[in-house]
Image (tube, helix red, strand yellow):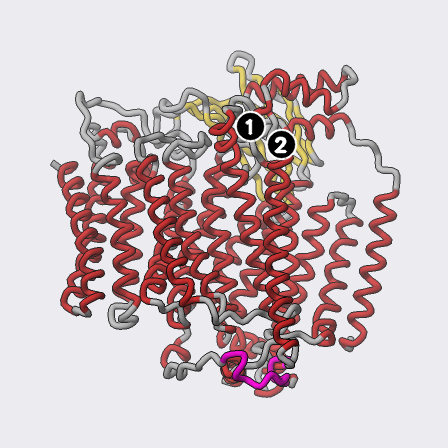
Amino acid sequence: MLPELGHAAIVVGLALSAYATIAFVLGARRGDRAVLASARRAIYASFGLAALAAVTMVVLLLTHDFSVLYVARNNATTTPPFFSVISLWAALEGSILFWTLLLTGWASLVIWRHRAGHVALLPWAGATLAAISAFFFAVMTWPGNPFTRVTPVATEGPGPNALLQNHPFMGLHPPLLYLGYTGLAVPFAFGIAALITRRTDEEWLGIVRRWTLLPWIFLTLGITAGAWWSYAVLGWGGYWAWDPVENAALLPWLTATAFIHSSMVAERRGSLRIWTSALVIATFCLTLLGTFLTRSGVIASVHSFTQSSIGPWFLAAIAVALTGSLGLLVWRLPALVGSERPAAPVSRESAFLLNNVLFLGITFAVLFGTLYPLAVEALSGDTVSVGAPWFDRVNAPLFLLLLFLMGVGPALPWGAASWRSVRDRLGLPIVAGVAGVVAGLAIGMRDAAPLATIGLALFVVAILGDELLRGTSSRARTRGEPAPAAAWRLATRNRRRYGGYLVHAGICVMAVAISVSATQGQDATATLRPGQNMRVAGYTLTYQRLVQEPLRDDPQVIETRAEVGISGRQTGSLATALRSYPSSSTPIATPSVQTSLGEDLYVTLLSYDPATSTVTLHALVNPLVVWIWLGGGVVGIGAIFAIWPDRRRATAPAPAPVPVASAGATPPRREPIPETAAPSVRAEEA
Amino acid sequence: MPRTYAFPLALGALLALAGLLVVVALRPASAPSREEVARQIAGDLRCPDCQGLSVADSNSGSAVEIRRQIEEQLTAGRSPDEVRQSFVDRYGEWILLSPTAPLAWLLPALVLLAAVGALTVWIWRARRTRERAGGSADPPVTELDRARVREEAEALDA
């Protein structure tokens, strides 16, 4: 009964999404408010139906109803409730259902939030979102029905994929990632709406910027949480393997980040309209591509748990989205060209443009590396691999250049920079960067990548700190406020700028932690009998005993753990384990990580012999890893700070639209304003 | 410190750093230990029974076995390239985590260079056009710029 209810909800959801698509288009063309209101209600209802279907599935999982194929494959009577609930996204059909829930949720939120405004854009954005929802409902109606029944009904199932039930982070990483993925459909929808209505103006940019930043935050946190999960669960001591599925999450993040930056130029200069539209389109197509790569089984990888017949559906969807939106873009080109105002060679605009070129360069490289083996195999039948050594070598220089720009950008004024102002801003930060490199050399670091990263990160942080100090001191001086209050007020009145700076600071922390941990780690492997010890990077690990017992909250799972005493910079004891799951032929490592601010001691149990209690341990000392997660947190806080609603500005009347003066109409005379006071805290220096 | 001195100081620091780096680079580096060479090779090889991990990173049985063979071959006096080749002979190109085809390395670089080139040309052409029109080479200040400055200044004082 319940499964039929779930499937009925999906079918009705498909009908309503299809109706909403048509109603939005008709309502927009006829200007019929009643039809538009009905389309909006259809979107809300489709969200309700997706929620009904998802709740139904969760109930089926919690009650272990093995008459449903999805439950029979991904659940066991002994699965703890928490892992039963998160099994909603443990495999293909459930993930699509979860995906649809989030997508219709975003659609409803957007439609509801803007129900009263943006009369021209909203119907077309709504139609696009409804069409995308309809696609996902259709996938669940036909090839990926999560409620398919199975007979005969088994009395016990294998439980969720062992890797998924090994760590509670699996309850956090996929929802964050999916929230990011699905949310990026919103800027795409508004991009399509703007192209159709020929309204790629400031109004459009304002909406899209906000609705890109929000999913961007989720995507950033989701990628970081995924790296953390991989580090804590997979047992190889790393957190990023350039696996195709990791790349699939990174690609839309790269283009979305490029959009966030170029939208600032577009907003200030009233240009780059083609480019920004193309970026939101590319971002959405890359999320579809990511789903295709992850879920069609086209690339075998640790994340491709399932293979299914949905591959062709997604390929078709990508083709439609890409050709449709690019066709629309080309069709509208005449309306978009003409307002482009190129930047001065040395200016913040140029820095932003170069930033975009680099982000797109990295996007191309990652996409190329991911698809290259497929292309070679399709063309010549040969199998080749593209892995971490290639991705590291190709991308590291580009990321270092981005880091450099991250510092130079904020130090350059909008408009055109004078040599003197640039020189004054860069001096001390350069000294800070050099000091960082020297310090690295002094402690014996010889690898170029971490040295360069440390130097550039300090350079960036010095520039950001300098910006904050200048603003604070001038505010403190002119308004007589104490420095902390001045700094806080300055930041909260320029949320986007200072939130952005905080994001950059977090990225710097992450960059240093990544490059140092990737190059400066040490490891050792040893086979030990009880009482014997091994050494790694100043630590002594003493193997004490082997314990084998079923897990308390899931007795189907047998855990074998080696208890180890440690001494060195951290002391204490740890237990590193292998777990045998009924659903997995090989035991799953449960590494033990002792974290300190300076380094992690990461111990994996490779193998054991129960007869002699001999174990083989792999111990790694990974410096600074915890700073990757902390830096990710700073990025999240900075981004939330940046988009936090500004009450003061929200209540102020909207500024009168300012016509973009054409270059020819304005006397080409150098004005003093942008030179020294360009929209930065430099106003008071003029 | 007055900011006027900061930049000469920075130039000095950069020069000193360059000198220091040259000294560090010229100092006879100790030859990498056999362990380091073995780890390097293992990092370039794909673990046959994992999905995308290198032999160095994986703890699977075959990765451990390949690490042992690398060690063995190096002890026997083979060069790193010979060791790598022996695995390519056995498993095919697939075992290498970095593709050997020059295209795989050139294409990303060419695309990036083309993009940077296009951006440069775009900026400089616009500059030339403005210069030829008899004005300043820099983009003219518009009402949009002024509005932004006013807005920012108000935000600063609010």
CB atoms at circles 1 and 2 under 8 Å apart?
yes
Mark 1 secondary-structure assignment: loop
Q: Chain of mark 1?
A: A
Please tell me the numbered disc located at residue A384.
1
Q: Which residues are magenta?
A: A662-676
Looking at the rendered image, the quarter that the C terminus of chain A falls into is bottom right
Asked if residue A421 is positioned above or below residue A288 in the image, the reply reads below
Residue A545: x and y in percent read 55, 23
Point 36% across, 22% down: residue: A582
Asked if residue A358 is positioned above or below residue B96 in the image, the reply reads below
Point 54% across, 69% down: residue: A498
What residue sits right under mark 2 in the picture? B101
Q: CA distance from mark 1 to mark 2?
A: 10 Å
Magenta highlight on residue A666: yes
Residue A139: x and y in percent read 26, 40
Main SS of the magenta part reads loop
